Amino acid sequence: MNDDQLENQGKRVTENIWLCPDGVYRWTYEYNMLRNPTILFTVWKVLGISFGAAYLLTLIVDLLQGTVKSGADLWASSKVFVILIGVFFVISIIAYLILAAAYGWKYQVLFEMTEEYVTHIQMPHQFEKTEALGWVTALVGFKSGNPAMSGLGLNTAVRSSSTSQLRTVTSIRVRRKRHTIHVNHTLDKNQIYAEEADFDFVEQFLREHCGKAKIR
């Protein structure tokens, strides 16, 4: 589906974002997984929190039992965690490079956004950016009463997704240089990507509709 056809089905609000007939903003984003290692940083953050919590719990137990009385004792209690962190650090880099290679060194995402939610939809790695508009094709199929086209669009577009309800978002972290906005709940996190030409619109929209969120 080309831009002229999309113009007949919706409204372009920024260079890459479309307001579709069903009232949903949609856009695609593709980034180089080597130049923008946001996913790797997220993995490191999760691992760091997990290791930190386990280490503190172990240290508290050792202190209560009186087994840590000197710097040497502290190192003896800590060195296993230091070694494990180093091992997982190396493994995570290797795993990320393997994943990036499997994806052709690019990550293709489709986003949907309304006043109630924003959804991050991962596309199959073989998709090109124009093919990601299969979701819009699906929408047009519904509107035109063509269930065959609708099913085709849905099947080609969806791989996995993560949805954030905006009214319950607790914090938003803006990383413009990485074209990333972190949308966080207490027990769940989402990452929204947008090109420079679209970033201000997405950021402002999320700021306005995530009323309970702290902005960082």
Image (tube, rainbow, N blue to C red):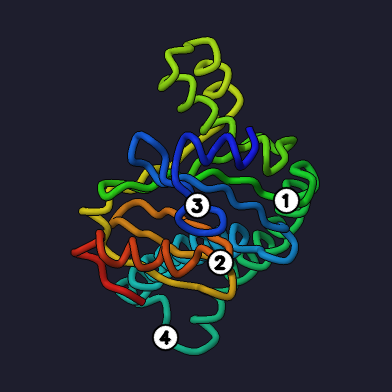
Q: CA separation, marks 3 and 2?
A: 10 Å
Seen from the viewer's position, the closer of residues 13 and 58 is 13
Seen from the viewer's position, the closer of residues 194 and 34 is 194
Q: In which quarter of the image is residue 174?
A: bottom left
Q: Which of marks 1 and 4 is in front?
A: 1
Q: SS at mark 2? A: helix
The amino acid pointed to by label 4 is: Lys
User: In the image, which disc is placed on residue 17?
Assistant: 3
Which residue is rendered at x = 30% and y = 67% of the image?
Answer: 207
Seen from the viewer's position, the closer of residues 83 and 182 is 182
User: In the image, which disc is placed on residue 69?
Assistant: 4
Horizontal side of residue 32 vs 81, given as left or right: right
Q: Earlier in the sequence, mark 3 or mark 2?
A: 3
Residue lying farthest bottom? 71
Crowd around label 1: few <14 · some 14–19 · many ≥20 (10 Å): many
Q: CA separation, marks 2 and 4?
A: 58 Å
Numbered circles on residues, count: 4
Crowd around label 4: few <14 · some 14–19 · many ≥20 (10 Å): few
The amino acid pointed to by label 2 is: Ala
Q: Earlier in the sequence, mark 3 or mark 4?
A: 3
Crowd around label 2: few <14 · some 14–19 · many ≥20 (10 Å): few
The residue labelled by disc 1 is 106
Which residue is rendered at x = 49% and y = 81% of the image?
Answer: 74
Q: In which quarter of the image is the C terminus?
A: bottom left
> In the figure, 215 relative to 92: above or below?
below
Q: SS at mark 3? A: loop
Q: Which of marks 1 and 4 is nearer the N terminus?
A: 4
The amino acid pointed to by label 1 is: Lys
The residue labelled by disc 2 is 197
